[in-house]
Image (cartoon, helix red, strand yellow):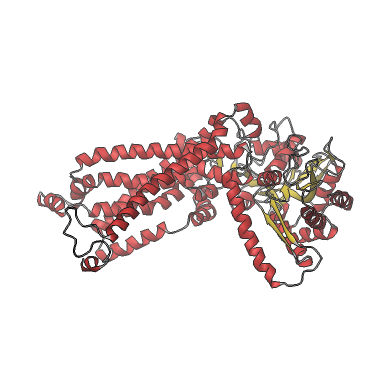
Amino acid sequence: MTDTTTAPPVATGPTVPPPQRPKRRLGDVIFSRLSSGSGFLILIILAAVAAFLLVQAFPALVSSPEVLKTKGYGEFWSWVLPFAFGTVWSSLWALILAVPVSIGIALFITHYAPRRLARTLGYIIDLLAAVPSVVFGLWGTMTLAPATQPVYQWLNTYLGFIPLFGGEASGTGRTLLTAAIVLAVMILPIITSLCREVFLQTPRLHEEAALALGATRWETIKLAVLPYGRAGTVAAVMLGLGRALGETMAVAMVLSGNQVINFRLLTSDNPNTVAAMIAQNFPEASGIRINELIAAGLVLFVITLIINSIARLIISRYSEFSGAN
Amino acid sequence: MKITKASLALTAALALSLTACAANEGTKTTASTGGLSGTLAGKGSSAMSAAQKQWITDFQTKNTGVTVNYSPDGSGAGRDGFTSGAVAFGASDRPFNDSEMGVGKFAKCAADSNALNLPVYISPIAVVFNVTGVDKLNLDAATTAGIFSGAIKTWNDPKIVALNPGVTLPAANITAVHRSDDSGTTDNFTDWLNANAATVWTNAHSGTWPAAYAGEAAKGTAGVVDTVTKGQNTIGYVDDSAAAKLGKASIKVGDAFVQPTAEGAAKMVDASAQVAGRAANDLAFKLSRTTAGTYPLALVSYALVCQQYKAASDATLVKAYIGYIASADGQASAAKSALAAPLSSALQAKVKTAVDSIK
């Protein structure tokens, strides 16, 4: 780059003999400070969030169950457990619905679609990521739920012997499955975009080698693309999961959530998620109830940390075998 | 105390931004009318939000020197904000209870002054339904409690049929919709159920839906209205003002089935006893949910003020503003814009006496 060599005449005078150390111009210094500063900043922010959660949650965590029963929402762990379950359960179903579709779209874009169509499709997927979650919430509760209700009724009537579809079907369609579908649509773009990038990184040689061995296109994908992209795919799925776990507004609007642990997908009586529950109760909360809600937030924070750590473990294991190195 | 630093900072920021707006508005008018000036901050009940907007507009038109800010952050926030002195008046869907009251507990009040709970807003709650082929429905509290607790599961249950002779009820499942968020509406609804049908509805009143009872949950009044409207064979409870197009159940009071009306709700407050052991001017009511001739399913919101303020300027503004909203004019204005039930003239007179006693 020619402009960087001519830029600041400040750093070294012309008479100074060339130093042993590599030259550091002002731009280098500023840039390295800025980027390491940003690096530290993110650590500080994370620590500050954790500290805030701990300090604010502390009164609720140390209060006696009697105090929490009379002034709060109830004994902490039994109160928060259904919501923690609901968070994980709804996100799990969102992943089950979204991941196959996302990988399918990503493979279509990278390996099947004509280039022009692939580009357009990519834009559309990215656009989907820009839709605010409140819009998804409105769509879910006003359009998707009534539209899917007859389907749920049918599933419940004819497949009700499967425990997941059992119970009494919801009359409104605002079930856990609807919430999971909305969440799936919301996390689809992020997983698709990342998978697409990952699949594009597959070395041409790997694919050509597979083709040379007589593999069909599907076999090529199976042999070269998917194993190579496995770590990246897991990372993409985890990012999607992160969004699903923390999604508040859409779930608060779509899901008919109660304080209950229930595996059934089609009833009105669903476990609410932590994030939605906090949003719904915070406006009217006061005193120890605020601490209890923040403690629930801390639980969500811990759940997210655990899931991300597991993801890290998986990624580091796969990357050794993926042929990426 | 329980007010967190973060929320204080937020309040401060909010107050700053609000006063900033107010300052802009103030520049438009040069001469102030009404002889009052200053800024009055209030906070609390979101149920009262629409009414407060109207009252503020009315009041500021008459008193151009005064700026009233009301943030509808919720009743809990209103009680905390008033206790901590963040605002000069609070608004809450329930009065302060005995443990919250106390001389010297309130930051804006003089050291020897207690708070006053003044009812200023009454809103009937309607039990709304959307059932195929049914446009009139009678319910008593025990049946309603059965429906909302999940004990009564279908519309043609004998208990519902017995209350509705001549009405063909479908053999469909009932979807009972409750609020998923903490709300004064739920608190009053469950209080009514518990007061009239304690054997069926065993939980005490609470703003959050009891975990023991299942059912469909929806967020906010709008969420309940939407869910009841869009769903099949649904029933829910919402502020009467929001129930416009839905069928409203007549609830059994004494021997009669009554529709929600503003007069009925106001009569319920008149029939209620004041909370014992309070100062003469404290108008906290223990709402009577059972008196015949009234509509006992209603929400009553209170203005929380000091008997005596530390700052005389606060006292002047609170007296003027709360005096206005509890007056016949103020109540009529809220009835028109927010579809609230006006206080009865007897209660208006009591509130006026109380407001006049504020120092």
Left/right of residue A266 with respect to residue A118 in the rendered view: right
Q: Residue furthest left?
A: A212
- Indicate left or right for B222 with A26 as reference: right
Task: Identify the residue shown where x is 83% and y is 43%.
Answer: B282
Give the left or right position of residue A76, taking residue B358 as reference.
left
**Is the residue B10 above or below the residue A264 in the image?**
below
Residue A291 place in picture, x, y as percent: 57, 38
Out of A50 and A229, give the one closest to the viewer.
Answer: A50
Position of residue B343 in the picture relative to residue B20 (left or right): right
**Image quarter hosting the N terminus of chain A:** bottom left
State which quarter of the image contains the C terminus of chain A: top left
Question: Residue B120: x percent and y percent?
Answer: 79, 51
**Residue B180 pos. (x, y %):** 60, 44
Kindly identify the residue that appears in the image at 76 percent across and 35 percent down. Answer: B98
Q: Quadrant of residue B32?
A: bottom right
Q: Which sits in the foreground, B337 or B313?
A: B313
Q: Can residue A265 be seen from the camera position used here?
A: no
Observer-nearest of A19 and B70: A19
Label tally: 0
Say which of B46 and B278 sits in front. B278
Residue B235 can be seen, yes or no: yes
Residue B240 x %, y %: 72, 52
Specify the farthest residue to the front. A15
Q: Is residue A322 above or below residue B29?
A: above
* Vertical relation: B154 (above or below) A123: above
